[in-house]
Amino acid sequence: MEFAFTDEQAMIAETVQAFFRENATSERTRAAMEGDGIDRELWTSFCTELGLAGIGLPEDFGGAGLGMVEFAIVAEAAGSQVAALPLLGLATAAQAIAAGGTDEQKAEWLPRLVMGEAIASFQGIHGLDVSGNTLNGEVRFVPHGTAADVFVFIRKDGAWIVRKDQAGVSVTGHTTMDQTRPLATVTLANVEAEPLADAQAARDALHAGGWICLAAEALGGAQETLDRTVSYSMERVQFGRLIGSYQAYKHRLADMMVEIEQARSAVYWAACAVDEQAEEADLALHAAKSFAADTYFMCAGNMIQLHGGIGFTWEHDAHLFFKRARSILSMLGNGDWHREQVATLIMGEAA
Amino acid sequence: MKLGFSPEEEEFRAECADWLQGQMSGEFKDITGIPNLVSKIERRKEWEQQLAAHKWSCIGWPEEWGGRNATLAQQVIFAEEYARAGAPNRVNHIGVELAGPTILAFGSDEQKAKFLPGIASGTKIWCQGYSEPNAGSDLANVKTKARLEGGEWVVNGQKVWTSLAHYSDWIFVVARSEEGSKGPKGITFLMMDMDQPGIEVRPIRQMNGDAEFNETFFDDARCPEDSILGTPGDGWRVAMGLLSFERGVSTLGQQMQFRNELDAIIAAAKANGLVNDPVTRQKIAKAEIGLRLMRYGALRMLSNADTAKIDGAALTYKIQWATWRRDLGELAMDVLGQAGEIAEGDEYEWTMLPNMFLFGRSDTIYGGTNQIQRNLIAERGLGLPREPRGDK
Ligand SMILES: Cc1cc2nc3c(=O)[nH]c(=O)nc-3n(C[C@H](O)[C@H](O)[C@H](O)COP(=O)(O)OP(=O)(O)OC[C@H]3O[C@@H](n4cnc5c(N)ncnc54)[C@H](O)[C@@H]3O)c2cc1C
């Protein structure tokens, strides 16, 4: 029985938590929110100084080896500060290229992505007009789309790499509720996309990486909303008492902790299951994404309520968590969809 | 970080499963899958003795007391296989899981020699005399009195909700031994023989129709001066030590039982077609996810068992499983519909799922109510101010 961090994992956790706490400050995140939602300086130092961007990617192509558990540790720490970073692109597009790309494709993209010299994004293109490798149409909701240099697009029968600077590609950014990960529409006009050799492997890796990244971000964010609300409740006095001494208040915080502890089990169960290629990996991934997202949203909502008026201001960070939580709920399949996948895994398709 | 168990541990699992399944499909077939604590009690005592004869009764205990010195992982594995084989709830679970470990931790060698063999062999059933009419959540408010008289403790007062007292040979009692003391001070932890004129047990019928718990009256009940754990007046420490055993390795075995219950709901949904209803599918998926997370929460807590720091998984475990199980009972009735509201025979007796629906209302009460759990989580886990008392 070793369902606990190894010493090395505990050390990575300590390092990344300190890194994001120190560097992904509210001030810097807010500056990034004014632009394309990326704190470039932070991303560069994360990729080059910390050297953790390659976690979960093959060492032959500039990666750092290790697995999804370590990736989840990083994403949890980044999520805890709502860091404005294109981490999800590494979890999805880079994973897809690593799993389904040819050696040339890996050599072309992975080292640059890991070093932060290129930014990746992704999306499903189920409704798009595809003939051979020629793509036509609009791809909506592409996270960090305006900043991305390369996209991985997937659908049931294929997976492709598209470069932003290719003929026929145009990107329109949108004012997005979560400004730390703004969405864009990518318009493709007769774009000759580059197919990934093993589309199935690419898709699976993209989903697994994406779900784990979002679930781990959600876990980190949820824990942070709890910690910050606990701190506030030990400063703020009303009716002559600390607000944290009122039972209705305490119980709400306790409920947050109960959900967060389950979310923590979910995230690391899923990450471990993927690393071990366990039979239950699919079930674990759907469970983790849906449960952690719900937990984050519940906690972030509570954070606002339990701060009172200050929690509703732009100046306070509560809304950063709340908006990130809302965006995670919908991204890469909502809770109902993931639970339906769980239902299918245990009971078969509905008739 | 790893999900599974080592090859040696899996070998141990096979050994456990082999023996347990052999028993439950053979000699003890008649007591597989019993949903409650009290039916077929004589056969269940025989089962306890069979476990002991093969050294499977208390595997975590030292070998000299009938155990196997099993590791935590082995205990977890045994508990899982025990439930998987459909073996009945341990009729002496209070002895095996609470009294035994407490005696091992706080008892003298003579006390160990006196009590442990009877617990391990299932010949002495134990019950827990904590709650009183005015001391439930506020256990430190116990009023039952113990005084020393001629080398014996003489006990007067009343306990309530004492599970299995009507079948028990021994009871452990927290009683106030210092006149005028208040709260956790001045309490003594006594071990008393139930077979004496000074103790009277009256069963209380529960809302599910069963009568597993009782009122227990003490009227000059007696035990020898040395039949206590800890020192006189220092019983609170022992009582609290005991509660920490309540969230031990049995949790994973309990989860196998939950698994069986959820599987029964899925089977019922398949039988009546609700398996195709999207809302029911969502609810079942939620229950499935909750159960899996409970498993990995328990594995986290057990993997961290030897670290001193407060473990969030351990602290939140009780409210988590209790709430999950209560909700599972509600899901069972949603799936069964009105069919779940009709008993099988003439008696007010319920099969597994309706019984679970009713019994689920107690899961969130005994062993610390959900509200008390939230207080504990907030105070111990989050460091928030303690609840004010009204009587200070
Ligand atoms: C099936 C079953 C088996 C049991 N078996 C045993 C046994 O074998 N031995 C034994 O000693 N006991 C046993 N109990 C008793 C059990 O431990 C108590 O019922 C439990 O501790 C609650 O105490 P109470 O019933 O006095 O409720 P109370 O403490 O009176 O609580 C009533 C309500 O008030 C709430 N409340 C109380 N204090 C607070 C607070 N500070 N903050 C917020 N809310 C609060 C509670 O949550 C509850 O909702 C059993 C109970 C059940 C249901």
Image (tube, rainbow, N blue to C red):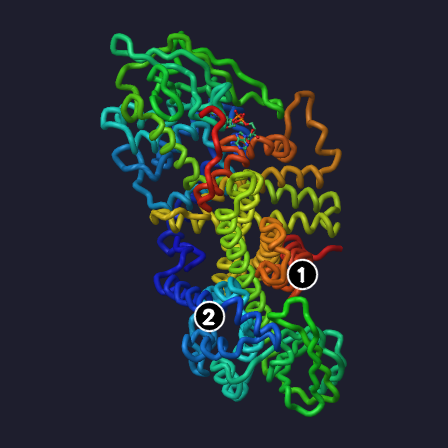
Give me the C-alpha separation between circle 2 and circle 1: 31 Å
Q: Amino acid at mark 2?
A: Asn
| Residue B98 in view of the camera | yes
Tell me: residue B48, above or below residue A111.
above
Camera-nearest residue between B308 and B72: B308
Q: Amino acid at mark 1?
A: Asn
User: x and y percent of residue A35 in the render?
Assistant: 61, 77
User: x and y percent of residue A48 in the render?
Assistant: 43, 80
User: x and y percent of residue B36 in the render?
Assistant: 54, 29
Near mark 1 (Cα within 10 A), the count class, few <14, some 14-19 or many ≥20, is some
> To which quarter of the image does residue B116 belong?
top left
Q: Earlier in the sequence, mark 2 or mark 1?
A: 2
- Residue ID at (54%, 73%): A85
> To which quarter of the image does residue B343 belong?
top right
Q: Identify the element where label 2 is drawn.
A: helix
Chain letter for mark 2: A
Q: Which residue is mark 1?
A: A334
Near mark 2 (Cα within 10 A), the count class, few <14, some 14-19 or many ≥20, is some
Q: Which residue is mark 2?
A: A23
Location of the C terminus of chain A by quadrant is bottom right
Of all residues shown, which one is farthest toward the bottom? Answer: A167
| Residue A275 in view of the camera | no
Mark seen at residue B43: none
Give the left or right position of residue B158, taking residue A298 as reference: left
- Residue ID at (25%, 11%): B151
Tell me: residue B309, above or below residue B96.
below
Q: Identify the element where label 1 is drawn.
A: loop
Chain letter for mark 1: A
> To which quarter of the image does residue B147 belong?
top left
